[in-house]
Image (cartoon, helix red, strand yellow):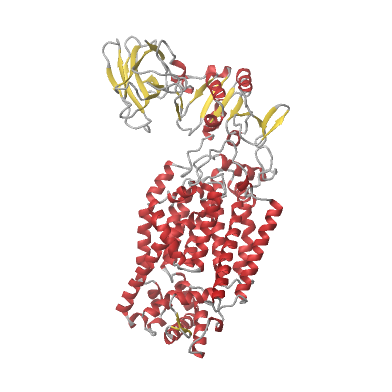
Amino acid sequence: MKYRNKLLKFDDEFDKSENTLHELVKVDTQNDRWEFQDLNLDSGTFGEVVERGIVEKTDSGYTLGDTEAVKSFLREEEEIENSSNNSQQGTFKRNICQYFSSPYSFALLVFVIISLIIRLYELGAAPFWLDEAWQSWAARNFIEGSGFSNPSGTPYDRSWLTISLPIAFLFEILGVSEFAARLPSVLAGTITVGLAYVFGKEVTDRPTGLLLAAILAVDTWTLTWSREARMYALFQLLFLLGLLLFVRWHQTGYKWQSWYLKCLIAIIPLGYITHRGFLLIGVILVVFLTMTVAWETYLNYIGTQSQSLRDPINGRKLMTLAGGILSGIAFLSFYGIPNILTGSPPQWYGGTTPGYYWDTLSGRYPLLAIPFFWIGVAYLLSKKQKGIFVITGFFVPFLIQRYLTAWRADRYIFYLYPVYLFICLAPFGWFLTKIEDLVSDYFSNKQGSKTYGGEKLNNIQSYIDESWNVSKFVIIILVIMFSQILVPIGGTIAFLEQNPHGVIDNRPDHQGPSEYIQRNSNPDDVIISSTPALTLWYLDEVDFSLFPYTDTENRSGETFDTRNNVPILDSRQKTEEVLTEHSGWIIADHRLRWYVNSSIQNQIKSESIKVNSSDWNDVQLYRFGEAAMHLSPMQQNPPENVIQKEGNVYGPRNNALALGRSEKTRFDWGENTGERSGSIVLRISQDTERERVLEALMYGTDDRKLNISVSDNRSQWREILRPRSGWECEEWSYHPEKFNNGTVYVKIESSSKSGLGGIVKTLQTRAENTDSNDICSLRAQN
């Protein structure tokens, strides 16, 4: 019964199982013992039947494990085929039977559908970040007749055929939008889920492939790049496909007429156009073939291998190896060594440690990294050449990028992620196959001839009953449980709701400030941006750039950003001239804080008024010039303009009033301007007496306590507001306070022993039961 289960599994998982079994029966009937050369099979297929125990090796050659069982199995298959072909109804039933012949296929379909739905979830909600803007500009300019280019019209040819062109096509059909631009990555990521299953099944077994597909369907890192208008999801798909095609070609004995070879050759230029890192697949093939040829030469030399090096298969290996080496030499002669290996990162690039890539991969699921990754490596080595190829396919590019490249980012190693996960999951897949065999044997022994009798197998329904056996359902349930423990689908959805760009750091929102400027700007306003490509996408106008580290050229003594065709304010003098001679707007994201020198930053803050909105992620909007004087209170940042330094009290010039902070302390949202311990008292006054609401946006921790009290005479204080614990807390606290003769005193004080307090980010008052901020005059008191 166990041997029959091996045949059933082989038939379920191998495409040409019946032809293979017929060939084995023919040779085994003619010979008591035989060799591989007697068969009309490729080495890969022969290796499968030996590994599965269908063929047994003896001292004098090979033989079928149970010839009569194989003959009986083939007769039953023919009877099923004949009965289903007797009528059109039978053909229809047969098609249904084949479609549902494996629960694994149905489970995979469910995983793929789930992966597609999650990838489409609020796909267009988040604004573009800079790298997406480059790709989208290329597509937008293409449909407008300017070719694949930057905003300035200079060429942008990265992934032009495989990403920019599909985006342009979707722009034409769906309109120019974030959703349309990201759709190609969604499709690539979804296909990768299905391909991962095929890859796992081909190299090891179906449970491993299904487990890999289930995790990739909802993994947050995979989802991140499957929802961005960039090439990394497609690069991952093509790389995994390239490895799979080589494995399949290897199993055919490296036949030149194989469709696997033709497809592999076809995707090489597509992979290179998508990302230059795809060339590493050529290095993988050369290294693998060099190792196998060297090993076989050694075995031949010591006499432990009977297969001659002059065998046609070895000849094709040597020719492939020589072709790969010559192709590499030709490429290097024509294009030179890739600059990622020889060049230095640009000035703005922060850099990483050599261990960055391993930390990135292992940090995803630390329990898988140690020890299961290394157990997986050992297990795959036992799978002989297929397993060795997968290990080579991971370590060769990983070590090259680990030791030979100085420019590192997590997205540059993303294409290896499915292979890394596959190695980690291989031991679990092996364990699941053992469970599957035990369950299958149990039910086979229990049902006996009732299930597997030849007469009952003539019925199509019985064929379905046999195929949908309990063991597969058990494995599917275990796969779902394991994947949901590792990465729950509910947690993934919640993560995407909070992080629209996934695991990428929060990206600046230029859409919101651009729309605000469109509503409130004057015709002569000047627009300054720290990231012009993004501002141009949403505003169609940028006059100056603040980002000094980009493609530049000198035009009559003025430095220009050639990608966006705008001049760069790269000195304090140029910045001062623009701010004093014009009115306009400054859209500043993290590039202002990170890359622009402090003198220009301070000048911008002193010569302009900040316009705030909590909806604009990582972006600060400034208004400068005469027009800034006419902003309504609602348009301004209240504390920045109405709290001044008086005596020994320090007020915030950049949206923060902090107790006991040094002048050089920097925060994500601004820079403190003074140092003060103890308390600060403010007087809030108005001309009319009516009920008002005092509001504060505060931060604090257990050892940085802060509270706000009020008084109408400065002698008796009532505590009204205190922040929740944790620096991440940012919410409005409010308290209704009736003013006495239009005046109330507000004391902000530290209650910690050190005299250090929390942060008051914003303090304001407004008329009760109204939405508009009716800002009162705040004056610091000694």
- Residue at far front of view: 302
Q: Quadrant of residue 660?
A: top left
- Residue at far right of view: 556
Q: Residue at the spot x=55%, y=61% of the render? A: 241
Q: Horizontal placement of 387 versus 689: left or right? A: right
Q: Residue at the spot x=58%, y=17% of the render? A: 626
Q: Is residue 173 visible?
A: yes
**How many labels, in total?**
0
Relative to 135, say whether 531 is above or below: above
Q: Residue at the spot x=34%, y=28% of the render? A: 700
Q: Residue at the spot x=40%, y=58% of the render? A: 372
User: How far across and how far down the image is residue 549, in percent?
Assistant: 61, 34
User: How far across and how far down the image is residue 441, in percent?
Assistant: 34, 75
- Which quadrant is home to the C terminus? top left
Relative to 536, say whether 366 is above or below: below
User: How far across and how far down the image is residue 363, in percent?
Assistant: 42, 48
User: How far across and how far down the image is residue 309, in percent?
Assistant: 60, 75
Of the pair 261 and 302, the residue shown nearer to us: 302
- Which quadrant is home to the N terminus? bottom left
Q: Horizontal placement of 466 versus 599: left or right? A: left
Q: Horizontal placement of 481 versus 203: left or right? A: left
Q: Horizontal placement of 690 versus 361: left or right? A: left
Of the pair 656 and 542, the residue shown nearer to us: 656
